[in-house]
Amino acid sequence: MRVPFIAGNWKMNTTVDEAVKLVSEMHPGLEKITSVDKVVCPPFVSLAAVKELIKGSSTKLGAQNLYFAEKGAYTGEISPLMLADLCQFVIIGHSERRQYFGEAGEIISKKVQAALRVKLIPILCVGEKLEENEAGRTREVVAEQLRSSLAGINEADGLIIAYEPIWAIGTGKAATGEQANETIGFIRQSITKLYSDSIAQNIRILYGGSVNSANVTEFISQPEIDGALVGGASLKADEFVGIVKQTAEIKSITK
Ligand code: PEP
C-alpha cells in the first residue's frame, strides 16, 4: 500500500520570518491529517527555523536542491551532509534547475546518489516540454530522463518520483487527470524495467503542475497517482492544508 504523499515546493519565496509565519499557519491543519505524508520544502536558509517549529510532528521537511560533493571548494553550494541533519527529503532535477541552471542526466544522477548516501529521500522530478508533448514525445523524453537520472543507482527503494510536465508548472494550465495518470503509469512500467515489479509497485509517483485545492481531486482520484508536488498553492496555508485534506479523503475512498 502506497501512503499518499503531498510536498510543497516553496521555490525562492519567503524570508525566514515569512517561512516561520507560513509554517505556523499551516502546521495545526496538517497535523490533523495522519493518513498522508506531508512535506514542506522552504528555501535553504529557512530549514533550521522551520525544523524547530515542526520538531517531533508528522509534518516533514525537505530541501529544494543539493550539491553532490560532501564538502570542499564549491562556493555557494550546499552539501548532502549539511542537509542530512536538517531534513528528510530533497527535490532533485526540478525543471527550473534543468532550465535555468543547466542540470541534466549525469549531474542529477550524482545528486540522487549523494542524497541516498546520507539517507535523504530524493524527490526526483521528470517531465517534458510543451513542444515535446505536442510532438508526441512525452514517453521517450520521460524514459530517457529516468534512465539517465537513475544510472548507477542500484537501490531505488524509497525514492519518490514527481512527474511534472514543464508546460503545466506555474502556468495555471494543469494536465488532465487522465493525461497525468497515463504518463505516471508509463513511469511505473519504466521502473519495472529498470528495477523490478515490486519496486515499481512500492514507489510513490506524484503529479506536479498547477495543482491547487480546486483541481487536486482530479489527480488524486487516479489510480497511478500517489500524491502531488505543489508549487504556488503551497505558499497559501489554507490551500495547502485543503490539498492534503482532500487527498486523505479521496485516497481513503479509493483504497
Ligand atoms: C513545482 O514547483 O514543482 C510546481 C509544480 O509548481 P506549480 O504548482 O506552481 O505549478
Image (cartoon, rainbow, N blue to C red):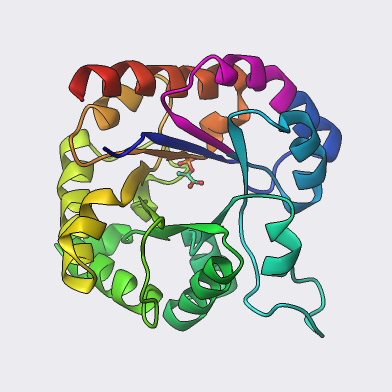
- Name which residue lies at 59% across and 71% down: 101
**For residue 152, above or below residue 40:** below
Residue 69 in sight from this viewpoint: yes
Q: Quadrant of the C terminus?
A: top left
- Nearer to the camera, 182 or 252: 252
- Name which residue lies at 43% across and 60% down: 124
The part of the image, by quadrant, that contains residue 85 is bottom right
What's the magenta region? 23-39
- In magenta stretch: residue 28: yes
> Picture coordinates of residue 141 (x, y %)?
26, 69
Q: In which quarter of the image is the N terminus?
A: top left
Residue 157 shown left or right of residue 112 in the figure: left
- In magenta stretch: residue 175: no
Residue 103 in sight from this viewpoint: no
- Name which residue lies at 62% across and 30% down: 235
The part of the image, by quadrant, that contains residue 145 is bottom left
- Name which residue lies at 57% across and 71% down: 117
**For residue 116, above or below residue 34:** below
